[in-house]
Amino acid sequence: MPVPFAAAALLPLALLVPAAAPVAVTEADFDPATAFVPPTAISHAPDLVPYGSHVKVVVDRSVPGRTVLTLSVAGVAADHEFPVHLHTGPCGADPAASGPHYQDAVDPVHPSTDPRYANDRNELRLALRTDARGEGTAAATVGWQPRAGEARSLVLHAGSPAGGHGSADRVACVTLDGLE
């Protein structure tokens, strides 16, 4: 029996890979980098981000030319401030595996310290402050959308007790889904 023309014409459309969703959600518990199955969320410093603590990342790209990222955590260090940045590589056993900060306009010099590139308009940055229970939410909006496949993780840096200034050490990493 021949296939009707309309059905035959639609078949190639069904084989297309769907575009990235305008809203991507990544939710996981932090695990050690040495877990048997590579974890979505890795803690490199269980004193600040204990194994089993929880993270949720929502990346909203529903408005063309804009990205809103919301990060929520529970069970991490109480009364702490974590600097958080979008990074270029996926999480790995080595904290450096997540690569440098993702930049909309890429600095040709690495590491990037030039304020023309290393700034909160060209990088997605958050300051995540936790309460006495170790819970916190932070959001940031930038006037661009990450290039497909180039923003792969969100990294929490050591920071310091809320309000202070601290180390840039990478203490946790979340591999992001849906930014292809």
Image: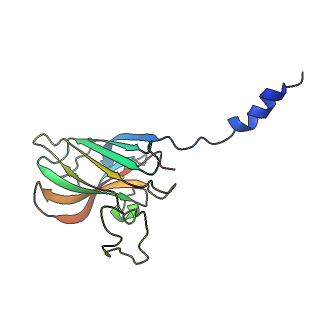
Q: Residue at x 49, y 57 (%)?
A: 147
Q: x, y (%) of residue 114?
A: 32, 76
- Above or below, 147 relative to 39: below
Q: Residue at x 40, y 57 (%)?
A: 92
Image quadrant containing the N terminus: top right
Image quadrant in which you'd find residue 30: top left
Q: x, y (%) of residue 28?
A: 35, 40
Q: Residue at x 16, y 43 (%)?
A: 134
Q: Residue at x 50, y 40 (%)?
A: 21
Q: Which of 37 and 157 is in front in this view?
A: 157
How many numbered badges does the structure rendering display? 0
Q: x, y (%) of residue 86?
A: 36, 57
Q: x, y (%) of residue 14?
A: 69, 35
Give left or right: position of 46 versus 164: right
Image quadrant in which you'd find residue 122: bottom left
Image quadrant in which you'd find residue 100: bottom left
Give left or right: position of 75 versus 110: left
Q: Nearer the viewer, residue 64 or 165?
A: 64
Give left or right: position of 73 versus 108: left
Q: Can residue 53 be seen in this view?
A: no
